[in-house]
Structure formats: structure tokens, C-alpha cells
Image: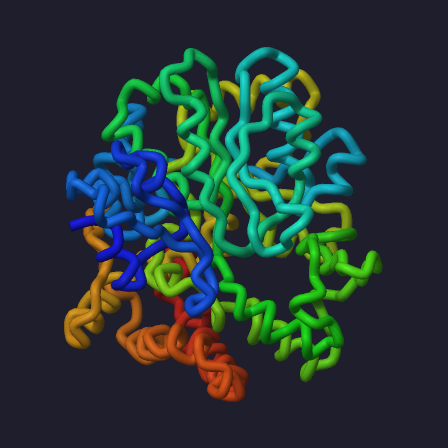
Amino acid sequence: MNVMQITNADLCLSCGFCETICPENCITIKFNPAKGFHEPIVNEKRCTNCQSCIDVCPGRAVDFPALNNIYGNPIPEFHNIGNIQRSCIGYSNDLQVRKDAASGGFITQFLHYLFDYNKIDGAILTKPNKKDAFNPCGYIARSFNEVLASQMSIYNSVSIGTVLKEINNDNQRYAFIGIPCQVHGLLNYIQQHPEIKINIRIIIGTFCGGYQTHFAHQYYFPKVGVPFDQIKNIDYRYGEFPGSFRLGLRNGQTKILPRRFPDKKQANRINTAFNSMFYIPRCYLCADKGNILADISTGDPWIPDCKGEKIGKSIILIRSDRGNTLFQQAIDKDYISIENIPFKTVMNAQKFNHERHGNQPAYQKLFKLFRKKYPDYTFLGKTQIINKRVYIRILIDCIKPFLQRKRWTWWLLRPLYFIEKHIRNIFIYNNPYTYFFKD
């Protein structure tokens, strides 16, 4: 029994922690063209079935209470959104960093402070591959200049866990920056290797809607005149917030493509490609879009106060004592500017996170009915189905992986997107029960 069972059940998240933890070095993360993302390949002849790869896998199981307790964090009052000591809008005080970043440059500038004041020796993050746009990698930045070199949003699968091989048995201090499933994988890894717990001085988590497979790019870019095989590198959030696509082509040319359109036909085309139709299958089952186990969570500020924002700002949620201490120090040293905002404003802006977390019992029931594998979640509190009409939405999620892997079915994705959008707007976003913090 090894991680291939998880891969075959479509529960893999491409995080790469299985490759790092394998004592026999018999796991390799490789791109699977049939599925459109990276997955582990196991050398069965060398595998001893020790199950370390299964135990570390965040795609198979997430024990929220156990992982929350690793660094001694208390059980949160609202289990579906985690501990929150402080909620604010923030941005970098370095104007160039703020302009070059996706959402105000908070993470980049916070790392600048951590390096300048010797709080960390390295930052574990992801960086784009300049030669292969769709094969990003995990990376340890050893200086702020190296952080700047990797300053770019990534929207396809990346195996960040493989870099933990470099920090085993050293005495250096690291910041870890990742999406929720990568944070889950890191904490699962620390459970099996507690000796590296002291190395990870802070965990900075980004909000996540889901990772796209390569099929999203194969679907969209040829429709706007860019052959998929000609794309050498890609910046998903170039320029003014929320950014445009900047494509570096193999012939040396650069193309800038907008992400937002006033024309409905063009808007629906890009939304079909990059708004859940082409996610990695396990992303549809995610119960933690808001990164509730990180020390600091951050993401785009989709709130009324930031409407029309051009340079960029970030929502910042401080979740732990160590996160709050370092965050306040960065503010005091004038690296970051913040504006405190009401807790309920943030939560209502992130109501899709509530829906995903609260409706997990509905996903579990339907997957059990269809005899499909489902993650083993242990939540911080009791989950409750928010709206029973969500079963329609789950049925749509179940067929998306099949449709995205068969090109001849791609024509169905746009009408399916309209159906899903209608369900979301009527039954979820306009449902008063999804607003947990009403006036």
C-alpha cells in the first residue's frame, strides 16, 4: 500500500511531500499528460509499503485539531474559519514591490523584514520556471533578492514539498509560504519528523480557489490567438491589480492579455477556463480555502472598501501569537502599512470558504453513494450542511474531471459554467445562511 492508491483515486494535490518523506527514495513527481498535472510515480520494486507517503499526504487526510495543536494554537471559536487575532488590509511601503506584486506586495515585503532583521535564514516558496511556463518548482530563497526573483503568482500544480530534503538536519530558520493543501502537507510532515518543527519559524498561507490543470491553458489561449505549445513563460498577474496575463513566447515575443472584459462573451470564455471548470479533481473537495492553519493568511481584497483598487492591497488575517509578534514588528519598522477592518467584513467577503467547509458532509454522502474515494477529514468542530441544494453543485463537480480530460466534451463546459454560476448566485451567495456575521 503506497501513494499510488491516492493517485488512482484522484486525490493527489501535487504537493510533493510523499517524494521527500520516502525512506527508500522510490517516489518521483512527474507530469501526467492524461490528467494535466503532476503526480507521484512509485518504483514498486523498491517500495517497502511503509506507508509514510500515505500518512503525509494532505490529499488523503487532514486532521485539523491535531495539526492546529502542533504549534500550540487554541481551538478557534469559529472552527470553519480558524483562529483570528487580527484582521486588516495591508500593503508594502516599498512602492516598486507593491506595483510588481499581485496584491500589494505584503508577503514579499514581510519577507524583506524577516531577512533584514535576521529572523529567518531562508524562505520556502514556489517560483516559476522561466524555460517551462507550466512546470513551476519549490524553492528556498536565501536572501531578499532571491525572493524578488520569484515574485510571481502561480496557478498550476507545483511540488513544493520536495525542497524539505534540503532542510533536514540543519539548524537554520525558515518561513514557509504556501496554499492550504501545502500547509497541510507541511504539518503532516512535521508530525512524522518533529525534529524540523523548530526550523519552521512562521507559516504564511495564501487563500486559494484551486489549482488549474494544463487543460485550462490549452482550452483558453488558442481561443485568443496564442498556441499553447508556443508559451515559454507566463505571469498571471502582470500590471495593475488584479493584473493581466503576460506571456513570453518561444519566438521571443511578449503578449499582454487582459483578465477582465466588459464584453460578456469574452468574459465567459476566460471564466470558463479559470473559474473551477479545470481544477485538479481534489481541489473540488477542499475544506480550507482560507488557510486556517497558517500563522498568517492573506489574499486578494474582494471587499467594497477596495473596489477600484489599482496598485493592490491584501486582506491579512493574523492567526497565531508568533505571527502577530513578527507582523507587528514589521509594521513598527515601517515595512508594511495596514488598515484595520471589521472581522465580519472579511468573513462575508470570503463566504465561499464557509460554503465549502460547511457543505463537506454533503460531498461525503454523495461520494459514498457513488463509491468514490473521499478525503478523511477531522474538523475542529461539527460541520453542518448550509444549503441542501448544494447537492446539484456537487454533481457538477463530480463530472468536471471527466469533461476536462476529453477535448471533444469541452464544448459542454461553457453551458455548465452558466448552470454552476446560477446555482452559486441563487443558492449560495444570495442565501442569508452563508453570511455568518450579519449586522
Depth check, front residue: 431 or 416 = 416
Q: Relative to 235, is 407 above or below?
A: below
**Quadrant of the snapshot with the C terminus:** bottom left
Q: Is residue 102 above or below residue 294?
A: below
Q: Tell me which residue sits at (28%, 45%) in the image.
A: 57
Looking at the image, which residue is at 28% across and 24% down?
Answer: 72
Outermost right residue: 253
Does residue 291 show up? yes
Q: Residue 368: percent from the left, percent from the top?
A: 16, 70
> Which is more toward the observer, 436 or 89?
89
Relative to 318, 83 lies left or right: left
Residue 158 vs 123, above or below: the answer is below
Between 157 and 344, the residue placed more toward the observer is 157
Q: How is the image coloured?
A: rainbow
**Residue 279 % position (x, y):** 46, 65
Q: Is residue 152 left or right of residue 193?
A: right
Residue shown at the point (48%, 58%) measured from the top left: 211
Expressed as whole percent of the image width and height from the top left, the position of residue 253 reads: 84, 59
